[in-house]
Image: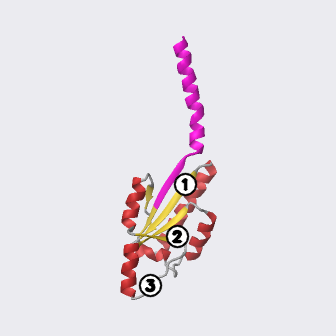
Amino acid sequence: MKLLRAIAAATLVAVLTVPAFAADAQHKLAIHVDESDEQVMNMALNNAKNVRSYYDEKGESVDIEIVTYGPGLKMLTADSPVKDRISAMSLEDENLTFAACGNTLAGMEKKAGKTIELVSEATVVPSGVVRLMELQEQGYSYVRP
């Protein structure tokens, strides 16, 4: 009988603590952009906004990193068609970051013969592909709009 009470008590404690862990859940999302299409850029930003809203409603946190490389680096250039939206979203969400592929940037600068200016929210990483791998190794979920 004591064993049954102990099992019941342990089960009750376990059931009651699960919601406490859920409230502290940390979600992580990597969004991959490799196209210079404004519609794809906006879809990536919409994905980030929708995921943020979903977890905010649940009282849970989420880190989101948008990783750009190849033609997708256009999303983070000073003349990006979505630069104003990136700026606004960054001000609203400190857990939203933007990674720009250093390999792509170097290639673009070599081809253009000049420095390519990025939006202030961009962080240059050595390689966009490697960054995506690292994020997945750190438990980030991966989305490509």
Looking at marks 2 and 3 on the same chain, the residue that comes earlier in the sequence is marked by 2
- Residue displayed at 58% across by 26% down: 12
Three-letter code, disc 1: Val
**Tag 2 residue:** 42
- Residue displayed at 55% across by 57% down: 51
- Residue displayed at 45% across by 66% down: 67
Which one is closest to the eye, mark 2 or mark 3?
Answer: 3
Does the image show residue 70? no
Three-letter code, disc 2: Asn
Q: Quadrant of residue 49?
A: bottom right
Asked which secondary structure carries label 2, the reply is helix
Asked which secondary structure carries label 3, the reply is loop
**Tag 3 residue:** 115
**Tag 1 residue:** 62
Q: Quadrant of the C terminus?
A: bottom left
Q: Is residue 138 left or right of residue 19?
A: left
Identify the disc placed on residue 47.
Answer: none
**Magenta residue check for 24:** yes
Q: Position of residue 38 (x, y in %)?
A: 49, 75
For mark 2, does the 10 Å Cα neighbourhood hold few (<14), some (14 to 19), or many (20 or more) residues?
A: some
Give how far apart the Cα atoms at labels 3 and 1 are: 34 Å
Q: Which residues are magenta?
A: 1-30
Give how far apart the Cα atoms at labels 1 and 2 are: 19 Å
Which one is closest to the eye, mark 3 or mark 1?
Answer: 3
For mark 3, does the 10 Å Cα neighbourhood hold few (<14), some (14 to 19), or many (20 or more) residues?
A: few
Q: Give the prevailing secondary structure in the magenta stretch.
A: helix
Q: Is residue 48 left or right of residue 57?
A: left
Looking at marks 3 and 1 on the same chain, the residue that comes earlier in the sequence is marked by 1
Q: Nearer the viewer, residue 77 or 134?
A: 134
Q: Position of residue 44 (x, y in %)?
A: 50, 66
